[in-house]
Amino acid sequence: MIKLIVSDIDGTLLEDGTNMLNPELFEVILKLRAGGIQFAAASGRQWVSIESVFDPVKEKIFYLSDNGAYVGCHGRSLFINEMEHSLVMELIRDIRSNGLIPMICAPDFIYLDRRDADLYQWLINGYQYRIKLVDDLQQAEGAFIKVSAYREQKIEQVSGQLWERYRHKTKMAYAGDMWLDFMAPEVNKGQAVRLLQESLQIKPEETMAFGDQMNDMEMLKQAYYSFAIGNARPEVKAAARFQSDTNQRDGVLKILKLLL
């Protein structure tokens, strides 16, 4: 019996940078919950953005945000995995020197440099992020759980030096065509799913998961019923046991309705 469903958001439920789910999904989530099945949204987004996407059911789901660095539910954080401050500052310098735009993620908001005004507007309007603008990211303070490098497209083609330098210091993951994320070494969506499973006493064979990108790989391995969305990367399709329709054709929703 399925007891937990976990889904990525961008590229799986939505197109990147959009915020409007099919309203029917909310009805299905409530019906699943009434049947004893929990739902968790797992994303590279911050939890504030996840909550805005799932507003009608925000009190009924779990949030696995920032690629698993944050696990929580409405109004309450359950687990936060911080990065070392010195490592975050080092990353900011190197991301800039490689011609990319850096972003620091704290548990409840994002730090962004004032010079990156265009990115700020897109993140506010598209992702509904909660952002603090600063004159210099090197002056940011507090607990940090993720650093992201941004490029408008094809970030993999220009980030090879960053990957080689930090692959042993951090957990790195490409999230779509625009983002390269850096977290503490042990952080990933699969680890967050495992934490949630242990807390709820749910087994991997009682778990269903949906994803499309490389940062979803560990999460899919943590669920027996692992689905690659139809538009997923080839590596993700090869890793998943099953495949659904594309995000544009409501692939996840179709499977969940069959489950009901």
Image: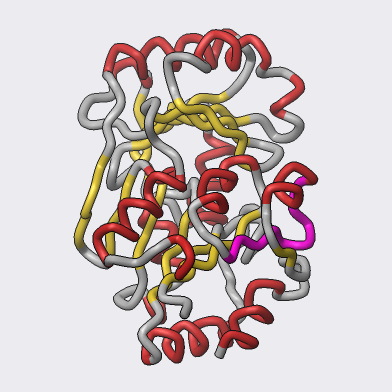
Q: Nearer the viewer, residue 193 or 96?
A: 193
Left or right? Give the position of 100 relative to 157: left
Q: What range of the chain is rendered magenta? A: 225-233
In the figure, 79 relative to 30: above or below?
above
Return the x and y of residue 225 as percentages of the image width and height.
Answer: 58, 66
Judging from the image, the colouring scheme is secondary structure
Q: Nearer the viewer, residue 260 or 164?
A: 260
In the figure, 126 relative to 217: above or below?
below
Q: Which residue appears at 40% of the width and 50% of the height?
A: 65
Return the x and y of residue 143 as percentages of the image width and height.
Answer: 23, 31
Quadrant housing residue 81: top left
Return the x and y of residue 41 as percentages of the image width and height.
Answer: 46, 62
In the figure, 143 relative to 67: above or below?
above
Quarter the C terminus occupies: bottom right
Q: Nearer the viewer, residue 201 or 95?
A: 201
The question of residue 196 being in magenta is answered with no
Q: Which residue appears at 72% of the width and 18% of the height?
A: 158
Q: Which residue appears at 55% of the width and 58% of the height?
A: 8
In the figure, 108 relative to 223: above or below?
above
